[in-house]
């Protein structure tokens, strides 16, 4: 089918995207040593992004556990034991153990020296109970161990670990490790972002192809009275456009993750709108795409368009946001406190006459200028935080202004902090008037 | 574009699928009263399916909280307070408060009498801290309250609640409520399952359209030496086929949720395989589709095909599994212990000469015959559990047999338990030889 080929199904699948990723567990081992603790334990299900990062396993719907125990610094190696239910043995061996080994034997990116192992839970074991048994086994049966755990470990797992005689202390070592990406991780983020570009190109093309049925009373400024755009013979709505974008993402091997948000006019001012609105000429159409790739890494790309607009609020907002985006991207470099990036973008929006500190539901700039992106769509660093930016961080930069009665304009891109500035992980053109992009 | 129209983009969006769903909170209120407790508290992020069910809100990536407090049975109504970060106020008002109200004023399906309210967290509040403050406020500041919580509440939230002077007791009231679906929920499950049917039809059509390049040494039984199928001019692989399926799901307004598993030959015996294998003639191609609809409800449809097969293991396995599927579907009715359904399917597979109790990685029937499906892909009841089936339960029924060296065959469907049997939520034809299905 022609449509399939155009949608990208004819392209060969990139084998690089399917090579196993491996996580350096050294920072976890070191956090245990630094805290004078005995082990690190994480428990969660397949939606736990810390576990996804640490193990590279998609994991079961039910909870599973990872235990990391430092060696004695001598002949006793550092060890990591992944406990999964029986049906996940093959997957865990492949993705956690063999994945790490192949990378070690391959390009030698690093060798963390952690001996990885999979153990199988009984079908009725609770993951916390199982983790307690592994801790006891690895640490020679001693009581009164101190275990580092992520703060949001499930309560029932924490209770199992405590009842087994351990003391728990929370750690942010995983979040810290995740914030600084390796080259291999940045490469995955870049590939996902390229798929987001393909989705946006398709959406922009659909808008450019759409017909304005009649001018209507646009000159009165009442865009609600104009007829919706027509595409492919029927009225275009936010849900129809979302489906086209999501199908393009699927054709490129990533998933929309339920996070393709498309709003038009007032619903473009609601950042979490997923309803079905007719897309009318003259209104801001805000398209935010945040796909998830096969390894879990996310993209983030936002553009705003107006079809057959008459200038006015949308055009003014676009100019302001474009300028704030320039300022923000120029401001990103190592050593800069993250919040100065937010502050400079906000000041630029203020210079264009928009409230730089608007509250939720008010008119103006209502959110922060950006946040880290990795296995989670939103992770450290926040661009309104005090910490300095560091090379290897990847952030979504997305200034925007909104007016609840009129619409919203946001422009969002994904950048990696480099040694001396930042790098856009994928380029997508700017412009409020949609054009055919060959998507 | 023709491809777009064929993929379903031209169809109008079904407005019914976007009507707000509402959850009857009466069972939660009653569980609190029955336990002589003071309130129910749930804390989780957008991936917490209990919260998704209770609130119908997609929710933020960070944790948020729901507090339910029974009234005094008199003028003091039952209350439910949802605490979300500021950017989610509009969404929460729309989906939790207004969604419930519109349903109440609409078809009058039920009226649980619970007064719903949204409160906004400070940007730096922890959801557990916020929930503790709401509990204190709603209960008049008294200490020593007993709170029912789901067992897997995040540990840090549990600690906040305990430090505020509350005692926690875990409850399975949410899981129990979720297991019995309302007509509106079954309708959503049916719609998602119809999208799964469209995805499967597209996959089967692609297999039927694919070319066998040459017969090769099939007569020697060594399918690995046959050339891969060709589709659309290039070799067909599991990942290419997965992309086609996922794009079709997206065109129908549901997402693949990362759960489209396609294996071929030996990888069809690995139930969690997501790699990229060439699809060769003579091999079992196992396609499992489990999409997620806009309200979170899941589908589950599995079929197995062989292109240009020579009979042998795949054909024998197919006959056995088809027969086991008949037996299982015939056995599902209210009052039957769920595990008898598994037992009868297993016995049927045994009668065909397959090991009905094979361990993971062995040859035979290695899993249970099915499980409940709802907002989670896998939830109660299990078809190997002792509890009796009840009307309103929705289960995926999917017997299968595997041989690690050869392949796997599974046939999976979604059924609702009715008053006197069960109803397939969507029909999809059987048959090991792929046909063009107009997908």
Image (cartoon, coloured by chain):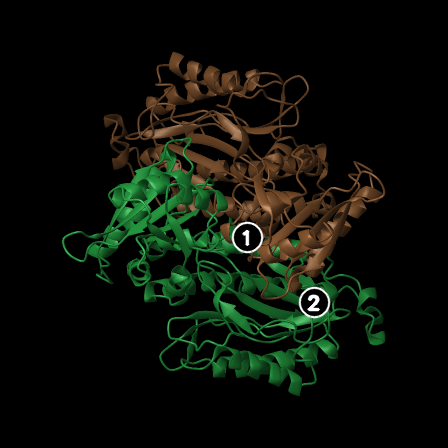
Chain colours: A brown, B green
Between residues B424 and A366, which one lies in front from this camera angle?
A: A366
Residue B231 placement (x, y as % from top left): 68, 58
Whether labels 2 and 1 share one chain: no
Q: Secondary structure at mark 2?
A: helix
Query: In screen coordinates, is A7 left or right of A141?
Result: left
Residue A70 placement (x, y as % from top left): 74, 42
Chain that bears disc 2: B
Between residues B213 and B147, which one lies in front from this camera angle?
A: B147
Q: Which residue is mark 1?
A: A157
Q: Which mark is residue A85?
A: none
Total marks placed = 2
Chain that bears disc 1: A
- Say whether residue A436 is visible: no
Taking the view exactly as shown, the residue that stands out farthest to the left is B75
Query: In screen coordinates, is B246 left or right of B34?
Result: right
Q: The C terminus of chain A appears in which quarter of the rendering?
A: top right
Taking the view exactly as shown, the residue that stands out farthest to the bottom is B351
Residue A33 placement (x, y as % from top left): 70, 35
* Residue B304 found in image quarter: bottom right
Q: Secondary structure at mark 1?
A: helix
Q: Which residue is mark 2?
A: B269
Between residues A97 and A219, which one lies in front from this camera angle?
A: A97
The residue under the point 49% across, 32% down is A302
Q: CA distance from mark 2 to mark 1?
A: 32 Å
The residue under the point 75% across, 46% down is A79
Comparing labels 2 and 1, the label whose residue is closer to the camera: 1
Residue A138 placement (x, y as % from top left): 73, 51
């Amino acid at each position: 089918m022609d449509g399939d080929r155009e949608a990208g199904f004819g392209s060969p699948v990139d084998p690089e995207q399917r090579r196993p990723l491996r996580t350096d567990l050294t920072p976890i081992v070191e956090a245990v040593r630094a805290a004078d603790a005995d082990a690190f334990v994480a428990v969660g299900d397949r939606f736990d992004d810390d576990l996804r990062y640490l193990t590279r396993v998609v994991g079961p719907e039910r909870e599973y556990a990872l235990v990391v125990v430092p060696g004695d610094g001598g002949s006793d190696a550092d060890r990591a034991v992944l406990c999964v239910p029986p049906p996940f043995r093959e997957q865990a061996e492949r993705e956690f153990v063999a994945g790490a080994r192949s990378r070690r034997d391959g390009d030698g990116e690093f060798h963390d020296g952690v001996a990885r192992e999979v153990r199988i839970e009984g079908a009725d074991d609770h993951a916390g109970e199982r983790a307690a048994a592994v801790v006891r086994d690895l640490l020679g049966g001693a009581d009164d161990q101190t275990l580092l755990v992520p703060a949001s470990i499930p309560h029932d797992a924490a209770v199992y670990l405590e009842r087994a005689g351990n003391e728990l202390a929370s750690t942010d070592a995983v979040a810290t490790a995740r914030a600084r990406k390796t080259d291999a991780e940045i490469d995955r983020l870049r590939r996902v972002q390229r798929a987001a570009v393909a989705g946006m190109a398709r959406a922009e093309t659909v808008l450019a192809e759409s017909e304005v049925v009649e001018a209507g009373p646009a000159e009165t400024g009442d865009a609600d009275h104009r007829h919706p755009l027509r595409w492919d013979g029927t009225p275009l709505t936010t849900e129809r456009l979302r489906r086209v974008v999501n199908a393009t993402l699927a054709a490129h091997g990533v998933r929309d993750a339920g996070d393709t948000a498309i709003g038009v006019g007032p619903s473009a001012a609601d950042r979490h709108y997923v309803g079905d609105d007719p897309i009318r000429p003259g209104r801001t159409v805000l398209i935010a795409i945040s796909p998830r790739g096969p390894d879990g890494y996310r993209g983030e790309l936002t553009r705003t368009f107006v079809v057959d607009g008459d200038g006015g609020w949308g055009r003014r907002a676009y100019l302001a946001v474009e300028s704030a985006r320039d300022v923000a991207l120029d401001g990103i470099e190592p050593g800069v406190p993250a919040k100065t990036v937010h502050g400079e973008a906000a000041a630029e929006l203020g210079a264009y006459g928009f409230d730089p500190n608007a509250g939720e539901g008010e008119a103006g700039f209502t959110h922060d200028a950006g946040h880290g992106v990795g296995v989670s769509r939103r992770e450290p660093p926040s661009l309104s935080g005090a910490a300095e930016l560091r090379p290897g961080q990847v952030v979504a930069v997305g200034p925007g202004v909104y007016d609840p009665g009129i619409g919203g304009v946001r422009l969002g891109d994904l950048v990696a902090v480099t040694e001396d500035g930042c790098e856009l992980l994928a380029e997508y053109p700017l412009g409020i008037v949609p054009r055919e992009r060959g998507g």
